[in-house]
């Protein structure tokens, strides 16, 4: 079981101010492990990144809202996420990980706790494709809740799942981290062409234009990810989201600076109207912020 590096402890102040009610639509809380233990069958162990660290970062960067995404290291125990949402008093929403044992009462508890979606990992190093019977049964349940599903995919999964899975989903679905396409393969690579077509043609499809450090072939500031993010924003400006991915678990290349990621977002989304949709309007609509 590998251990993850900690985030950059010295975020830089963004060069430009974010709009009021800007949302970090992809962030995590980890632990503290002595209060919220990690899953015994986890594939990695992160350093603790508790609620207090997330709030301090958001206050420093100028982010008024956030969506806390359950990560696989906590498994289906969503307690740390629910605790953070409750302490945020309306500032945060959540995306849970659930299994086939979740019942209506459990879903209602999550909904009251601020959860608005479920997440499934397809990424190979996190266990690969889930049990698809469970996947479809859970999607039937969340459809009744008015929720969405978040899909954590690798680029090759977009090719594999495009016809037999993605085209059959009947709830809004969000693809994490630009589908983890690889910038070195260029804009013409098949996974990215399929992702762009999906965003143009399927009104249920959303994408997060974050995770530039996972897309980039190099080191920060990860500018080789800019054309990919820009193309996705142009394809579906009302169905794009952005987030920091704090505290950046499983970074194998160069650990990003969170202030630098905000500056990068301004470079790939320089238009003020599009930026407001990306940071304010779209997450408010999908995550039911008051």
Image (cartoon, rainbow, N blue to C red):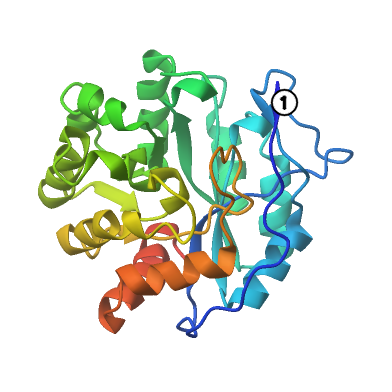
Residue sitting at 57 percent across and 75 percent down? 64
> Who is closer to the viewer here, 104 or 25?
25
Return the residue at label 1.
39
> Who is closer to the viewer here, 169 or 277?
277
Residue sitting at 62 percent across and 73 percent down? 12
Q: Is residue 156 above or below residue 173?
A: above
| Left or right: 242 in relation to 51 | left
Residue sitting at 22 percent across and 65 percent down? 237
Q: Position of residue 185 (x, y in %)?
A: 24, 38
| Extreme residue toward the front, this view | 218
Residue 23 visible, this orientation: no
Q: Is residue 191 above or below residue 83?
A: above
Task: State which quadrant residue 282 falls in.
Answer: bottom left
Q: Position of residue 180 (x, y in %)?
A: 37, 39
Q: Position of residue 260 (x, y in %)?
A: 52, 68
Q: Position of residue 253 (x, y in %)?
A: 53, 42
| Left or right: 20 in relation to 77 | left
| Left or right: 206 in relation to 221 | left
Residue 132 visible, this orientation: yes
Residue sitting at 54 percent across and 78 percent down? 14
| Left or right: 254 in relation to 237 | right
């Amino acid at each position: 079981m590998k251990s993850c590096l900690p985030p950059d402890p010295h975020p830089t102040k963004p060069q430009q101010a974010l709009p009021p009610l800007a949302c970090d639509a992809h962030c995590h809380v980890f632990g503290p492990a002595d209060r919220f233990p990690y899953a015994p069958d986890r594939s990695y162990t992160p350093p603790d990144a508790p609620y207090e660290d997330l709030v301090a970062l958001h206050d420093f960067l100028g982010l008024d809202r956030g969506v806390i995404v359950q990560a696989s290291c906590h498994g289906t125990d969503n307690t740390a996420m629910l605790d953070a949402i409750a302490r945020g008093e309306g500032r945060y929403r959540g995306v849970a990980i659930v299994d086939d044992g979740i019942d209506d009462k459990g879903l209602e508890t999550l909904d009251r706790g601020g959860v608005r979606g479920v997440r499934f990992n397809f990424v190979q190093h996190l266990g690969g494709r889930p049990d698809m019977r469970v996947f479809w049964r859970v999607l039937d349940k969340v459809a009744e809740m008015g929720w969405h599903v978040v899909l954590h995919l690798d680029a090759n999964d977009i090719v594999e799942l495009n016809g037999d899975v993605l085209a059959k989903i009947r709830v809004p679905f969000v693809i994490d981290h630009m589908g983890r396409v690889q910038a070195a393969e260029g804009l013409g690579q098949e996974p990215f062409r399929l992702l762009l077509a999906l965003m143009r043609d399927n009104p249920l499809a959303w994408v997060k234009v974050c995770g530039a450090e996972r897309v980039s072939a190099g080191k920060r500031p990860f500018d080789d990810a800019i054309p990919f993010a820009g193309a996705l924003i142009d394809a579906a400006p009302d169905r794009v989201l952005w987030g920091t991915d704090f505290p950046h678990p499983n970074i194998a290349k160069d650990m990003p600076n969170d202030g630098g990621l905000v500056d990068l977002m301004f470079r790939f989304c320089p238009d003020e109207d599009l930026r407001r949709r990306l940071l304010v309007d779209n997450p408010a609509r999908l995550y039911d912020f008051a």
